[in-house]
Image (cartoon, rainbow, N blue to C red):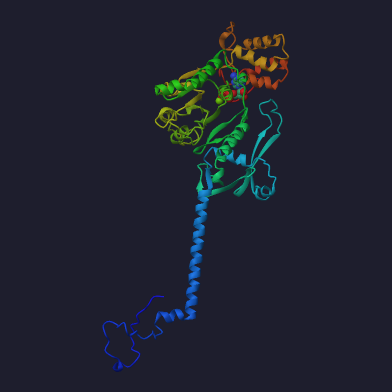
């Protein structure tokens, strides 16, 4: 308690009776005790006041204690726990989600009580059953459900004694470029278990890859981002695409050589890029070949159709700078990027499209990504900007043309090889096509009009006549294209070739 020298302002006694006040209180005469209610001593002796102070003190101490506790807990959290936040934009987001949904061993008292995914979400993809295996007649669909942890907090047991707290949440009002709400996934582990994270990501990645084993992933542009198009498809065997003699081998060898030569490029400071242009009429196997090649190389396909509405220079450039890893860039219909293409379409639409210079810049401008294999396709080589065909943009041009005798024979063997052992059916079929003049002007007989057919049309014919050689030979006339030669139209039973 501080000693207070009272300096009474109201004299206790009449002023007249008081001795004249001395400037310094003399030590010998202690001043009279504080007599006033204004004295602090009195205040503290007041039980009501003292009780109040006590309470306030307790309150303050409690508040301080609480703060200290919170700060301490925060400190502890920071010191003892590791958080890792994964954004939906990151490729690992979906891998980790799939990994979290893996069934795991939750035996044990703690595990049983703690770890349960209480809210799940499902992502479903459907497809027609085996569209490529030849049962296109069936209208069955196959649905594939993948269960994922839903939004909110979960705890999973990674292995005995190692728990991971998971928080999946929608991040505010931010949306991804595709218009979906942005999401984050936060994994929290004990600091002591932080090495487990590497394991988690490795396992998640391996799991994602196992889903894609033997499959080809196709990415397509969705708004400003790449998005997986449907489910990964079964790899298309290269052997199933029949190009003219030597063409496929030449292309495959070139791509493989490029892939093996990365060091050569980096040593010389040359951008590690290679471009191929496949041109020719529709239905000749351009797209199919690229898909099969991707399968062969274990690459995915990142596909952009330049004739798509809404594809602009900016968007194209942006997409090309962020190609999915290990993917072949496939630019379909590059002739859509016409010089000064600003006029209205017949339907009055003058929408924004990719310009020729936009395409060139996207392919090798400053922003163009390094490390890229690009395949460009077009049905109209004559409409291309010649500047496109320049090393770095297009290094190799290959015409994928109408079906040749060689291709027709190879396709026959793929479809009827097992029942046409002596190749007599094949000879009759090829001769019939020759007779119809379907291999161009090779025929000696000048009365036969020069025309062609497409490999797609031959495939259609063979699929229609599954296991029936005679049927295929009898219907060969249907291979005569309807519109190829306007002056000699033959529409009888023509098989429409897919675009
Ligand atoms: N050379 C070919 N070898 C095998 N199948 C082919 C060939 N050409 C076309 N097809 C078949 O025809 C259809 C269309 O082929 P696609 O690759 O899309 O042709 P393009 O891209 O040249 O227009 C596909 O179903 C494909 O399997
Ligand atoms: Mg195509």
In this rendering, the answer to whether 99 lies above or below 60 is: above
Horizontally, is 5 left or right of 451 in the view? left
Front residue of 185/477: it is 185
Q: Where's the N terminus, which quadrant?
A: bottom left
x, y percentage for residue 51?
50, 76
Q: Is residue 88 visible?
A: yes
Observer able to see residue 186: no
Q: Does residue 8 appear left or right of residue 150 in this picture?
A: left
Residue at (60%, 33%) from the top-left corner?
A: 206
Furthest-front residue in view? Answer: 28
Q: Quadrant of residue 207?
A: top right
Quarter, ligand 1: top right
Name which quarter of the figure residue 140 lies in: top right
Front in this rendered view, residue 157 or 460: 157
On the image, the x and y values in percent for residue 242 come to 60, 17
**Residue at (53, 30) in percent of width and height:** 303
> Which part of the image, by quadrant, shows the C terminus?
top right
Q: 223 or 373: nearer the eye?
A: 373
Q: Residue 73 in the image: x percent, y percent?
A: 52, 55
Which residue occupies 68% across, 42% down? 105
Q: Residue visible at 53% across and 49% down? A: 80
Q: How many marks?
A: 0
Residue 11 placement, left or right of 316: left
* Residue 450 horizontal/vertical position (percent): 57, 12
Q: Nearer the viewer, residue 167 or 214?
A: 167
């Amino acid at each position: 308690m501080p000693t207070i020298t009272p300096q009474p302002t109201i004299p206790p006694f009449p002023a007249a009776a008081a001795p004249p006040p001395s400037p310094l209180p003399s030590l010998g005469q202690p001043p009279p005790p504080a007599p006033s209610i204004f004295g602090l001593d009195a205040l503290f002796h007041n039980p009501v006041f003292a009780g109040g102070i006590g309470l306030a003190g307790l309150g303050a101490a409690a508040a301080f204690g609480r703060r200290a506790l919170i700060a301490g807990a925060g400190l502890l959290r920071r010191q003892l726990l590791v958080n890792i936040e994964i954004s939906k934009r990151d490729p690992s987001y979906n891998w980790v989600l799939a990994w979290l949904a893996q069934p795991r061993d939750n035996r044990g008292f703690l595990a049983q009580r703690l770890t349960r995914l209480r809210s799940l979400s499902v992502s479903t993809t459907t497809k027609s059953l085996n569209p490529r295996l030849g049962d296109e007649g069936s209208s069955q669909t196959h649905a594939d459900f993948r269960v994922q942890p839903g939004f909110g907090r979960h705890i999973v047991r990674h292995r005995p004694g190692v728990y991971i707290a998971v928080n999946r949440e929608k991040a505010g009002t931010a949306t991804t470029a595709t218009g979906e709400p942005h999401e984050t996934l936060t994994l929290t582990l004990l600091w002591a278990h932080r090495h487990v994270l590497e394991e988690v990501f490795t396992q998640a990645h391996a799991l994602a890859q196992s889903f894609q084993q033997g499959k080809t992933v196709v990415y397509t542009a969705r708004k400003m981002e790449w998005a997986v198009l449907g489910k990964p498809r079964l790899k298309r065997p290269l052997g199933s695409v029949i190009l003219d003699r030597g063409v496929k081998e030449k292309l495959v060898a070139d791509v493989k050589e490029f892939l093996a030569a990365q060091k050569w490029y980096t040593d010389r400071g040359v951008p590690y890029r290679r471009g191929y242009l496949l041109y020719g009429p529709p239905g000749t196997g351009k797209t199919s070949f690229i898909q099969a090649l991707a399968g062969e190389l274990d690459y995915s396909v990142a596909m952009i159709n330049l004739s798509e509405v809404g594809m602009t220079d900016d968007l194209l450039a942006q997409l090309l700078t962020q190609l999915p890893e290990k993917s072949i860039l496939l630019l379909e219909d590059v002739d859509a990027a016409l010089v000064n293409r600003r006029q209205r379409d017949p339907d009055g639409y003058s929408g924004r499209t990719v310009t020729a210079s936009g395409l060139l810049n996207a392919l090798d401008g400053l922003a163009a990504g390094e490390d890229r294999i690009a395949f460009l396709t077009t049905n109209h080589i004559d409409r291309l900007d010649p500047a496109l065909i320049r090393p770095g943009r297009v290094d190799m041009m290959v015409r994928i043309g109408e079906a040749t005798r060689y291709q027709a024979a190879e396709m026959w063997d793929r479809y009827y090889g097992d029942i046409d052992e002596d190749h007599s059916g094949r000879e009759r079929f090829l001769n019939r096509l020759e007779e119809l003049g379907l291999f161009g002007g090779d025929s000696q007989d000048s009365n036969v009009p020069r025309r062609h057919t497409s490999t797609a049309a031959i495939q259609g014919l063979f699929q229609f006549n599954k296991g029936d050689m005679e049927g295929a030979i009898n219907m060969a006339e249907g291979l005569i294209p309807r519109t190829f030669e306007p002056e000699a139209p033959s529409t009888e039973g023509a098989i429409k070739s897919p675009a």
